[in-house]
Image (cartoon, grey):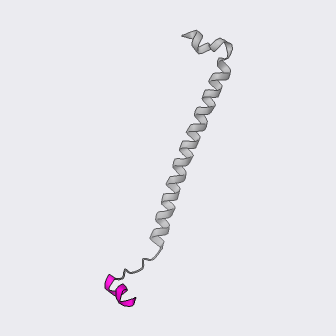
Amino acid sequence: MIDMVAMDGYAPYVWTCYGLVLVVLLYLGVSSWLKQKNLIAHAKELQAATPRRPRRDRETVKGAS
């Protein structure tokens, strides 16, 4: 088991690469999640600030055509 972890002297390079990939993947996941969270909050703010137009009945729309 120790020989497998040591990887014939290449262990520092290999484990450093694995560590960097893990850090980058975690960063991308967290930053994407935070960006989505902020965009949803911003969309809700915009939706709350926009006045709603009154809905027209279908009869009104058909009569106007």
Above or below: residue 3 compared with residue 51: above
| Image coords of residue 24 (percent x, y) | 61, 37
Q: Position of residue 41 (x, y in %)?
A: 48, 60
Q: Residue at x 33, y 82 (%)?
A: 58
Which residue corresponds to the image point at 66% horizontal and 20% vertical from the top-left? 12
Magenta segment: does it hold 61?
A: yes
Q: Is residue 18 left or right of residue 55?
A: right
Examine the image and state in which quarter residue 52 appears.
bottom left
The region drawn magenta spans: 58-65
Say if 10 sits above or below 22 in the image: above
Drawn side of residue 59 relative to residue 7, left or right = left
Instruction: Name the residue furthest front.
Output: 65
Can you name the residue that lies furthest to the bottom here? 64
Query: Which residue is rendered at x = 45% and y = 77% of the image?
Result: 51
- The quarter of the rendered structure image containing the N terminus is top right
* SS majority, magenta: helix
Q: Quadrant of the C terminus?
A: bottom left
| Image vertical order of residue 52 relative to residue 60, above or below | above
* Number of marks: 0
**Residue placed at 51% from the left, 62% from the top?**
42
Q: Could you tell me residue 60's position as x and y percent?
A: 34, 87
Where in the figure is residue 35, as x and y percent of width and height? Answer: 55, 52
Q: Is residue 5 magenta?
A: no
Q: Give above or below for 7 relative to 32.
A: above
